[in-house]
């Protein structure tokens, strides 16, 4: 422990009196006697004898008095994040104008507070200062090691956040293409974050690792689904976030995890729990999509459509609400899903013309050369809306384009789409006629195969089931 006697002797008279009066007020007689005795330069032996303490008890007494004085030097026991940032600006002055013992006590208290708030970047300033004032001391190497350790941690945290951002961008690309090589890239990014987590164990990196694993399990189909208990991992991560100080940047990631709770419960058919999280998330829809670097929150737009349809709450689709939604205009994944979301709002308002117009705008304004999966998703939706609008020629042209693309490019992963094409073609040939057995058989085939990585038209499934199964 630092030389408590030197620190007490170096205290300004005003600070000394504040500490003294505080001990008198709290009737802390032993602390008060030790404080006054050191101020009078009494020897340790005389103090131990006067207080009738053994060496261990005396050490504990000194340690606790040191903590109390440390709080006064640093300006209080429970500093806010803002107060801590202000104290950081005083470091240079304290190190150059105060005795080394006082400066060290101030820096150690600041270190404790910064650790409590997970302010690791700011800790670099503290360790750098401790290193400088210990340049002639045997503590210099110790503080240098702490400084280097936190430089490595800061770089690792920054790299982990970069991995998370890359993961979310690739996840959006995979959602639009379902290409196996992109799934392999997602799994590789998971391996990278696990390596960072093992080298630099911290709550922040654990949260990032969990975000990546949860999204792999919820939005992709891999062997991880058998290895990871998604519900337990969600609850564990929620607990970690709840335990973070309010000022920690990751604290505001709660909304991203609420979104994953909703997606998981909706996917597994737990509509009661899904409804609870839906209400929480939908209140924040106006800024939810700005979390795109934290998790793939734009998926909520499609899940929301499917959820409201299943719950028969489609009257809640509001055009005015849509106008207030903020998003990154450079994020293609979000931009396209917003276009589908807009079209479905028009669709449920029975404004089929504007619904079709919005989908056509999506196809004309964006390149889907590498994203066949989302392209046929949009075109199948467009065909269905054309059929509702009784624009059968336009529906036929759109469907013919999908079928030709599948045959010419020899795409083998979409037999269920070919089945749905036949369902729609029957509607075009015999408009207004209830689905016959053959049409219903094709639709049954489509539904049986339309799952996991092949899932298509999630936002339309309830409508299709109502039209082709409920007879």
Image (tube, grey):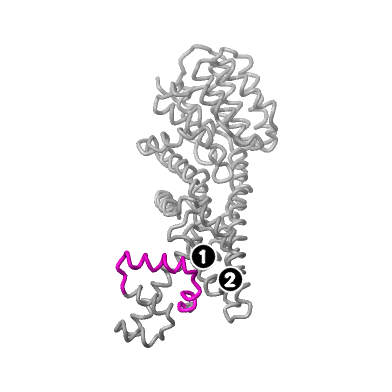
- Examine the residues drawn in magenta and state their main secondary structure: helix
For image coordinates 56% across by 66% down, the residue present is: 199
Check whether the beta carbons of the residues at disc 1 and disc 2 lie within 8 A of each other.
yes
For image coordinates 49% across by 46% down, the residue present is: 252
Left or right: residue 179 compared with residue 30: right
Quarter of the image for the C terminus: give it.
top left
Residue 442 higher or lower than 333, as above or below: above
Number of residues whose C-alpha sits closer than 10 Å to that of mark 1, classed few (under 14), some (14–19) or many (20 or more): many
Label 1: which residue? Answer: 111
Residue 348, how many percent across, how many down?
49, 20
Number of residues whose C-alpha sits closer than 10 Å to that of mark 2, classed few (under 14), some (14–19) or many (20 or more): many
Q: Say what secondary structure mark 1 lies in.
A: helix
Badge 1 or badge 2: first in the primary sequence:
1
Indicate yes or no whether the magenta region holds residue 15: yes
Quarter occupied by residue 368: top right
Magenta residues span 4-29
Residue 47, how many percent across, how many down?
36, 83
Numbered circle sitting on residue 130: 2
Residue 240, how many percent across, how many down?
43, 54
Residue 147 appears anywhere in the view: no
């Amino acid at each position: 422990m630092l030389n408590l006697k030197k620190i007490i002797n170096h205290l300004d008279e005003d600070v000394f009196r504040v500490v003294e009066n505080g001990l008198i007020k709290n009737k802390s007689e032993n602390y008060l006697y030790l404080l006054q005795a050191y101020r009078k330069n009494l020897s340790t032996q005389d103090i131990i004898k006067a207080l009738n303490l053994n060496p261990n008890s005396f050490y504990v007494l000194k340690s606790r008095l040191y903590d109390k004085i440390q709080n006064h030097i640093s300006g209080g026991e429970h500093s806010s994040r803002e107060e801590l940032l202000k104290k950081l600006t005083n470091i240079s002055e304290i190190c150059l104008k105060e005795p080394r013992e006082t400066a060290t006590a101030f820096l150690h208290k600041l270190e404790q507070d910064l650790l409590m708030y997970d302010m690791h970047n700011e800790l670099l300033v503290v360790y750098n200062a401790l290193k400088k004032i210990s340049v002639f001391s045997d503590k210099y190497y110790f503080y240098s090691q702490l400084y280097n350790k936190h430089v490595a941690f800061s770089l690792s945290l920054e790299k982990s956040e970069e991995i998370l951002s890359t993961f979310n961008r690739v996840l959006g690309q995979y959602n639009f293409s379902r290409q196996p090589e992109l799934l392999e890239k997602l799994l590789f990014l998971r391996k990278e974050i696990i390596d960072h987590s093992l080298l630099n164990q911290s709550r922040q990196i654990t949260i990032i690792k969990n975000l990546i694993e949860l999204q792999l399990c919820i939005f992709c189909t891999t062997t991880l689904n058998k290895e990871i208990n998604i519900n337990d991992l969600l609850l564990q991560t929620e607990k970690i976030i709840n335990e973070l100080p309010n000022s920690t940047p990751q604290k505001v990631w709660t909304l991203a995890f609420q979104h994953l709770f909703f997606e998981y419960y909706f996917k597994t058919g737990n509509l009661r729990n899904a409804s609870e999280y839906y209400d929480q998330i939908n209140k924040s829809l106006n800024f939810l999509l700005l979390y795109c670097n934290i998790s793939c929150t734009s998926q909520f737009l499609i899940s929301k459509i499917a959820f409201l349809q299943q719950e028969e709450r489609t009257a809640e689709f509001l055009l005015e609400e849509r106008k207030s939604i903020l998003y990154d205009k450079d994020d293609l994944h979000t931009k396209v899903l917003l276009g589908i979301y807009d079209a479905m709002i028009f669709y449920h308002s029975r404004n089929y013309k504007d619904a079709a117009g919005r989908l056509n705008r999506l196809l004309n304004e964006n390149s889907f050369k590498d994203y066949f999966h989302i392209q046929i998703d949009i075109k199948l939706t467009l065909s269905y809306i054309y059929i509702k609008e009784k624009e059968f020629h336009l529906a036929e042209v759109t469907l013919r384009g999908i079928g030709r693309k599948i045959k010419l490019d020899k795409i083998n992963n979409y037999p269920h789409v070919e089945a749905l094409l036949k369902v729609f073609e029957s509607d075009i040939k015999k408009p207004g006629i209830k689905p016959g057995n053959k049409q219903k058989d094709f639709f049954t085939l489509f539904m049986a195969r339309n799952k996991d990585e092949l899932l298509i038209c999630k936002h339309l499934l309830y409508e299709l089931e109502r039209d082709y199964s409920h007879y």
